[in-house]
Image (spheres, rainbow, N blue to C red):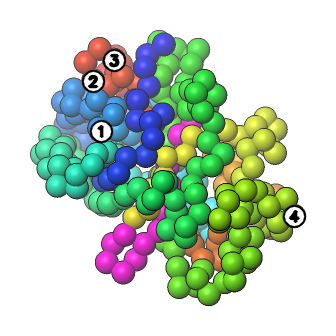
């Protein structure tokens, strides 16, 4: 099996920079992707490819699709599908800036930079509300099984699919809640991170409890807070070997199965939604054989 991009299974870095590109010149896609593949190590730079790139190149990546726009759901979900995505990781924002500039130069013949978001690690890995993020993440072998494709094909093994959503928080609203009300939003005690057994059915943990689905909906979350001017929230990343688990969780969050919406929506909302294929690593950068051969 080809190795997955290592950052998918690593801890959240101190600093992150997320770049989204859209196609500008389709005829240059192959040459640009080949050049980018050589500079992506999967650790300091993670790359994801959108469905439009694949279809424009007249290729197929089994399992890759557009992000679903649930405009008629009890809580509408937006889709803002990009074509190429990078997650830059490190400790120094200046270094990430220059790394992103280098990527933009290489990508420019085929792609236009569309959106940039800067993220960071808060405390020991918390959301800006002060609650720990990613508590239920699978670890070790379970994380590998959840996040990376295996046993499918030589070209696809080691792949991962990532759902990317930028969530915008209303922290002023959240901070007006009592401590108990805040705990009930997440279904955990802020002070101890312990699950609250009698939390209401709208509590976030009860909406996305991975073992409550059949089969279990395991994903590996690698989210980070973000700040831009006076706005802030969470850049949500969900890696898995398919989009099935994420879509099951999302459907339950918006109440499509029982009409109960996730309490997160009382103070936060997604303002973007994207799906990408994260190719495996080969001997020299990303293995793009699925697109090039």
Q: Alpha-carbon distance for marks 3 and 4? A: 48 Å
Mark 3 vs 2: CB contact within 8 A: yes
Of tags 1 and 4, which is closer to the observer? 4
**Compared with residue 206, is residue 66 higher up or lower down, i.e. above or below?**
above
Dot 3: element? loop
**Residue 205 seen:** no
Based on the displayed image, in which of its 4 quarters is residue 186 positioned?
Answer: bottom right
Residue 72 at x, y percent in the picture: 68, 68
Give, as a single range, the part of the protein colored magenta. Answer: 227-240
Q: Would residue 235 be counted in the magenta stretch?
A: yes
State the residue at coordinates (18%, 45%): 99
Q: Which mark is residue 285?
A: 2
Residue 269 at x, y percent in the picture: 56, 71
Q: Earlier in the sequence, mark 1 or mark 4?
A: 1
Q: Alpha-carbon distance for marks 3 and 2? A: 6 Å
- Identify the residue under disc 4: 198
Q: Is residue 60 left or right of residue 28?
A: right
Q: Alpha-carbon distance for marks 2 and 4? A: 48 Å
State the residue at coordinates (87%, 64%): 198
State the residue at coordinates (60%, 24%): 141
Q: Residue furthest right?
A: 198
- Identify the residue under disc 3: 282
Q: Alpha-carbon distance for marks 1 and 4? A: 42 Å
Dot 4: element? loop
Mark 1 vs 2: CB contact within 8 A: no
Q: Would residue 45 be counted in the magenta stretch?
A: no
- Identify the residue under disc 1: 45
């Amino acid at each position: 099996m080809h190795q997955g991009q290592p950052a998918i299974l690593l801890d959240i870095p101190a600093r992150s920079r997320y770049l989204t590109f859209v196609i500008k010149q389709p005829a240059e896609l192959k040459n640009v992707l080949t050049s980018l593949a050589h500079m992506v190590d999967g650790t300091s730079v993670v790359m994801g490819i959108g469905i439009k790139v694949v279809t424009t190149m007249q290729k197929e990546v089994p399992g890759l699709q557009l992000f679903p726009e649930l405009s008629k759901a009890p809580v509408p979900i937006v889709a803002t599908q990009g074509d190429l995505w990078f997650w830059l990781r490190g400790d120094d924002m200046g270094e990430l800036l220059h790394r992103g500039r280098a990527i933009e130069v290489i990508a420019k013949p085929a792609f236009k930079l569309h959106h940039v978001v800067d993220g960071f690690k808060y405390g020991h890995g918390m959301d800006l509300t002060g609650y720990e993020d990613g508590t239920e993440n699978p670890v070790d072998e379970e994380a590998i099984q959840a996040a990376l494709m295996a046993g499918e094909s030589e070209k696809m093994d080691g792949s991962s699919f990532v759902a990317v959503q930028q969530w915008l928080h209303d922290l002023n609203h959240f901070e007006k809640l009592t401590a108990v009300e805040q705990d009930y939003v997440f279904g955990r005690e802020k002070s101890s991170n312990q699950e609250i057994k009698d939390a209401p059915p709208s509590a976030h943990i009860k909406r996305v409890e991975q073992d409550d689905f059949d089969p279990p909906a395991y994903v590996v979350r690698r989210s980070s807070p973000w700040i831009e001017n006076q706005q802030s929230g969470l850049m949500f990343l969900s890696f898995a070997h398919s989009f099935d688990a994420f879509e099951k969780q999302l459907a339950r969050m918006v109440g499509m199965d029982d009409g109960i919406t996730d309490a997160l929506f009382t103070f936060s909302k997604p303002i973007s939604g994207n799906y990408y294929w994260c190719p495996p690593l080969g001997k020299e950068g990303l293995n793009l054989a699925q697109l090039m051969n």
